[in-house]
Amino acid sequence: MNYKPDEGTLMAYLYGELDAAETEKVEQYLQQHPQMREQLQQMNNVRKALSSLNDVEVIAPPVFVDHEQHSIPFWKAGYFKITMGIAASFLFLLVAARLIGPEVTYSNGELRISFNDAPKNPVVEQSLTANEVQQMINTSLVKNNETIATNWEESNQKIQESLNKNLTTNSARIDKLISVASLASQDQVRTFVSGLQQENMKLMQDYFKLSSKDQQVYVENLLVDFTKYLNEQRKQDLILFQARLNNMEKNTDQFKQETEQILASIISNPEGTVRKVNNY
Amino acid sequence: MAETLPNSVMMHADALLERARQGDKNAQGKLVQVWYKRIYNFAYKFFYDHDLAMEVSQKTFISMHRNLAGLQEATRFKSWLYTIAVNYCREELRKRKASRSVSLNDFSPGESEVSYKWEASSGKLDNPEKQLRHTELSDLLQQCLMELSAEQREVVIMKEYEGLKFREIAEALQISENTVKSRMYYGLDGLKKILEKKQITKEALGYEL
């Protein structure tokens, strides 16, 4: 067997990209050449080592250059739109101006842009002389003064009249009222005073009646109470007296007993005393 | 047969592609959503740099939008997309070499991306310690990848992480299939040596594998 796989075939074998027949051949060769097998094994180890180098995570950028951007029709381009917009607005202004009919005049350092009818030069009125003006003012003043004076007098008169009227009516009313009042008051006062007197009298009588009754009752009560009190006092005193008497009786009894005892002791013990006497 | 899930998914993808080619904006947007992560990750592993990967993926999809209508065979969409991506990657690589601003980045690649990577890998591993170890390992593997030549790196990433067939890689890179396999072989061989040099043995990887 002179077959010797070249490097390429070995690589294809290592990565499993050989067809079945070729794979068979290479395996047979490797069985006969352990050196080669060892070498391939080592390469496989390298592959294993490499496999621990992982992919780096990355996120694709979402926006990408759009190559069709360049083929945008020129009438959609921004600058074209802007220029066309400006041109259209100018055109509109011009047409509008044309329709309205502008007039531009320049005179005496005054620029005037006007639409529709240009104003005609103002009609120069006949100028008035100072005297005329003065006269007009004077006449108007005089007129004014006259009217003011008449007005004033009129209003004055009116006020005067109305005042007089008011005064007369008011005084008449007041007089009437006073007379009525004076007439009425004399009778009323009299009745009022008499009424008052009667009321007072009644009040006083009632009061006296009430008070005398009350007083009677009060005094009676007082007397009853006082007698009760006195009775009570006497009872108390009697009890006290009794108690004292009892006490005295007790005392006398006690005294009696004591004296009896003393007498008894003396009697029962005459010798002792005698002896005592003797001893001295 | 047509009722099986992968088939219907493929049919859906084909229909999506067809609509996108006919100028359907919605379909084009969806196409971007579907492929963005793959292209970004391809570029990220190629450069080990977030900004460059973002730039390349955005350029790729802008180009896709412009040229999708001109794509003749829908079946070649995948390799066609990777062709665009690889071309932009190479362009960026040339720019970087020309500007010489690379050296610092190469010295400690991904240093500025630490916070980003923390974010990116969060949620996959529950244990913080595990996560730290994992990020360290990822960094290490990524550094190993960066030591390969650009040609080998392209092929290895496409094969190992993007799951393209050798035929598709050949189409994408517009080279022969044998060349692709050869680059893959030497790429793996190179990686093996680099791993040995960095003393990343099978045992060291044991807790991860």
Image (cartoon, grey):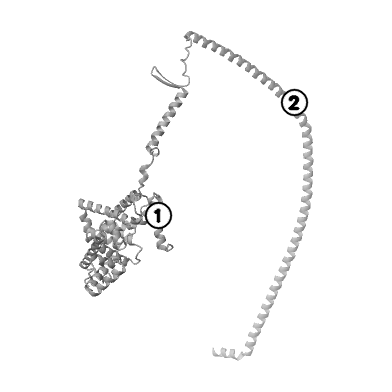
Q: Is residue B76 left or right of residue A237?
A: left
Tag 1 near tag 2, CB within 8 Å = no
Q: For residue A156, which numbered disc appears in the image?
A: none
Label 2: chain letter: A
Which residue is the site of mark 2?
A176
* Residue at which label 1 appears: B16
Same chain assignment for discs 1 and 2: no
Between label 1 and label 2, give the one nearer the viewer: 1
CA distance separating discs 1 and 2: 122 Å
Q: In which quadrant of the rendered view does residue A243 lie?
A: bottom right
Q: Badge 1: few (under 14), some or many (20 or more) residues near its Cα, within 10 Å?
A: some
Could you say which is closer to the camera, residue A105 or residue A20? Answer: A20
Q: Quadrant of the C terminus of chain A?
A: bottom right
Looking at the image, residue B15 lies above or below residue B126: above
Which structural element holds mark 1? helix
Q: Is residue B7 above or below residue B20?
A: below
Q: Residue at x 68, y 78 (%)?
A: A250
Q: Position of residue B134 (x, y in %)?
A: 30, 65
Q: Chain of mark 1?
A: B
Residue type at tag 1 = Leu
